[in-house]
Amino acid sequence: MNPLRLEYWAQILNCMAAKSKPLSPEWIEVLVDCPGAQGLYTYRIPPALAVTPGDILSVPFNSQQLGAIAVRYLTQPDLNLDLIKPVEAVISTGFFSSSYWQLLDRIAEYYQTPLMQVIRTALPPGLLARSQRRIRLKPAPSPPATLLSASAQSLLAHLHQSTTGDYTWQYLQRQQRGAHRALQELLRHGWVESYLAPPQTAQPQKRQVVTLTAKPADESLSQRQQEILTGLQRQGGELWLSDALQLLQTTSATLKRLAAKGYLSLEAREVLRVGSHSTAAADQPKTLTAAQTQALAQLNQLEQYVTALLHGVTGSGKTEVYLQAIAPRLNCRQSALVLVPEIGLTSQLTDRFRSRFGERVCLYHSGLSDGERYDTWRQMLSGEPQVVIGTRSAIFVPLSNLGLIVLDEEHDSSFKQDQPAPCYHTRTVARWRAQQANCPLVLGSATPALETWVEVQSSRDSQGQRDEAAQTVYLSLPSRIHNRPHPPIQIIDMRQELQAGNRSIFSRSLEEAIAALPATGGQGILFIHRRGHSSFVSCRSCGYVMECPNCDVSLSYHQPHDQAEPYLRCHYCNHYQSHPSRCPECASPYLKNFGSGTQRVVSEIAKQFPTLRCLRFDSDTTRRKGSHRALLTRFAQGEADLLVGTQMLTKGIDLPQVTLVGIVAADGLLYMPDYWASERAFQMMTQVAGRAGRGERAGQVIVQTYTPEHPAVQAVQQQDYAAFTEAELQDRQALGYPPYGRLILLRVTSPDPIAVKQAAEDFASKLEAIAAASDCDILGPAPAPILRVARRYRWQILLKLPLSALISDLSCLRQHCPDRVSLTIDVDPLNLS
Ligand code: ADP
Ligand code: ZN
Ligand code: ZN
C-alpha cells in the first residue's frame, strides 16, 4: 500500500471529525413515513449531522430505517432522553424551505389544530414514499480495503458494479445482510452519499384523440352521423376521445364506424400528466382600458408585501389585469400563485392563462390524482418560475421565489375549509405567505367581503401612518369592458303572484322572458340556491319569516321523517317550537318551508316549455372529472336554451350570448341561519346577475322573492355595494359580529346522541372560566342545524369575542374529550350549520 494514500485518508477522517459542532440544536421533531405512524416523533441530532427543518432524513423507526421530514427543532423534549434515537442520515437538504414550516406552524397555532393535521392537509399524500432514497459513490479515489469491514467492502463492490455508481437503498438492502451497518461505515468515511431520487419520470400517458379527416357531406351517412361530424368540426376538428364522447353524445363504437368509413382518425397521443389541457390558441395581451391601465400601473409598483383590493364590477376585466401583472414578474424569474374558488369553473380562466403563458401554467387542486399532485409538487420544487392556478389547498404549494399571489373572487366562502381541521381561510393564509415571501397579495372581487372592505376603509383613514404593511391598496374597475351596460334587474314580488292566482314557481315575468328566448336567439341561466339548506319557514301570503325570539336569525325547519310532526329550532340558542299551522302575522295557511331544487325546476320547465332545451348544472351532474367543462362547452355552443344550476353558476362564467338570468327564489339565500346571510345573498345575487349581458346583446335579470323590501335585494337591484355594506356593517357592529368581533365555533360530534350532548355541556362549562377572563360570550351549546351527518350527532358552541380579546389556547379542551366524542375547533367560522 502506498503510504501517501494512507495519509490522504487519515487527513480526510480528521477533517470530518473537526467539522462536528456541538452547539447546534440537539433534538428535532420529524414526520415519519409509516402508514400507522401518528403525530411527530422526536430524534436526537448527532453532532456530526447538520439537520435543518425541511430536510428529508432517514431515521430508525421500530426495527426499520424510514424516510422522514425534519419539521422543527425541539429544545426540551419531554421524553426519557435515553430513549431518543439519533437521526441516521440527511438524505436531501432544503427539500422545503424552513419558512415553509413556519407557515404551517402558524396555521396550527391560529387555527387551534395539531401541527400533524396541518401537515396532512398541506402535503400531497405519499410524498415521502414516492421520494426514493438512493446511494452513490462519491467521486473520490477508492479507499484502502484494510480500513473497511467485510460488509462495507461488499457494499462498495456492489456499487462499483453499477455503471452509474448508484443504486436504490432498497435494492442494496436486498443484496446483503447488515447493509445498514455497512452503509453507516461508508457514510462516516465519506465514501458514499445518499440522496433523494428525482421523481420518476412518469410514464408518458397516452390518450385517444379523434380527428376529423373528411368533410361530412356524404349521402351514405345517417343524420346522426352527420351531426357528430359537424359537431366535431365545430370543435376545431379534434378532440380527446373522452371529451368527444361527452360533447358529441356518442359512443366509441359509432366513432369507430365513422373511422372505418374514413371520416375520422382515432389514434393514441401523448399527454403531459400535469394537467390535461385543451388546445388553447396563443393569445396576446389586450390593450387595456384606462381603469385597467391605472390598476396595473399601481400593481407593478408594488415590490413588497402589501394587500391590494381589485374591486371591479363583473365583466370589468379583472382577469386581464392579473395576467398583465403576472407577466413582468415571470420575466424576472418569479412565480405567481392564482387561487380560485372552484377549479371546475375555472376552465375558462385556465385556458386564458394557458394561452398567455403556455407550459409555465400548472394546475393544483384536489381533483388531481395523488401521482399528479406529487409530480406538480416536485416540479415546483425545481424552482423554475411558473404560474400555479389552484383551489384553496394550492396555498400550500412549495413555490419558491413568489412574486405575486392573486385571490380571485376573494369573497367566496369556498376559500374557507369547514372540515377536516385545520379550518383555515385561504385569504388569511395567503396573507401570511405573502408576508413571508414579501410579495404583494391581490384580492379580486366585484363584491368584496365586508372584512376586506373594512380593511380598505381603515387603511384610507390611517393614510400616512407608519405601518405600511397593514395598508390595503384600493384599485377600482368601475365599469364593464366596452362600457357595456349592466343588465337592468327586475324584482318580482312573489306574494303578488300568489294573490293573482299564480301558484307556479315562475312569476309571469320570468315565464314570459323564458318563453321569448328561442325567438331572440339568446340563452338563459336559472339560479337555484343549493338544496338542503333552504330550510327556513315563511308565509307565502305576507312574506313573514319565522324567527327566533332570542336571536336575530330565522328558525330552521325540521321534520325527522315523513310521518313526524315538523318543528322549528334556533341553532344559536336552541329555542324550540312546534310548526304553527297558520301564519302568526296574517293567519294565512300558506306557511311553508322553502325548497325548490334544480330537479324540480327542470321538470317544471319541461312541463311548461316542452320545446325548450335545458341543461342541469349542479353537484349531481358535475360529479365526473371534466364534466363542468363539458357541460359549459355544450351550453356555450348553443346546445341548450337554459342552464339550470346552483351557486356553481355564480362563479366567473363569461358567456357572451347569455341574455337572461333568473333567480328563482332569493329567499333561500336571505334567511340562512347565520349572521352573514345578507352579505352572502348580496354577493351571490350580484355575481349571478353579472352573468347576463356580457356580449353585444343587452341582458335582463329577474329576481323572484317574497321579501322584495329586504336590504340585500334592494341593494342588488340598485347595484349599490357601498350603501349595502354601510347598512350591513352597522348591524354587525351593533351585535359584535365579524368584522367587529370574532367567532370561534366548537363542533362536538359523536355517534352517541347522549354522549355528545353531555360533552358539549361539559365543554361549555369549562369555557366559562376562559370566557369570563376575555370578555367573551358563549352561545349554546345547541344541536347543529343538521343534527346527524354520516351517523354522527352534532352539537355546537359558539364563542363571540371582541376583536381585542386574546384568543386563548383551546386545545386543552381536547384532553377532556371522551372516547367516542370528537371536537373540532373552527376559528373564524363561516358555516354555522
Ligand atoms: P372579470 O374577471 O372582471 O369578470 P374578465 O377579465 O372576464 O372580467 O373580462 C370580461 C371580458 O372582457 C372577457 O371576455 C375579456 O376577454 C374581455 N376583456 C378584458 N379586458 C379587455 C380589454 N382591455 N379590451 C378588450 N376586451 C377585454
Ligand atoms: Zn302571513
Ligand atoms: Zn335563538
Image (cartoon, rainbow, N blue to C red):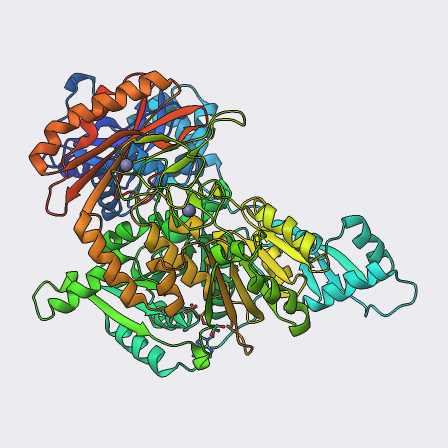
The residue furthest right is: 220
- Above or below residue 568? Residue 301 is below
Q: Is residue 191 visible?
A: no
Q: Nearer the viewer, residue 165 or 199?
A: 199
Counting from the top left corner in percent of width and height, residue 621 is at: 59, 47
Q: Nearer the viewer, residue 259 or 728?
A: 728
Question: Quadrant of the image for the N terminus?
Answer: top left
Counting from the top left corner in percent of width and height, residue 98 is at: 23, 45
**Left or right of 231 in this view: 192:** left
- Above or below residue 78? Residue 511 is below
**Left or right of 221 in this view: 313:** left
Number of marks in the image? 0
Counting from the top left corner in percent of width and height, residue 812 is at: 18, 26
**Left or right of 618 in this view: 534:** left
Question: Quadrant of the image for the C terminus?
Answer: top left
Q: Quadrant of residue 514?
A: bottom right
What residue is drawn where x is 61% and y is 56%?
A: 631
Q: Is residue 196 visible?
A: yes
**Left or right of 67 in this view: 490:** right
What residue is drawn where x is 25% and y is 44%?
A: 828
Q: Quadrant of residue 130?
A: top left
Q: On the rendering, which quadrant does ligand 3 occupy?
A: top left
Counting from the top left corner in percent of width and height, residue 449 is at: 30, 57
Q: Nearer the viewer, residue 678 or 503?
A: 503
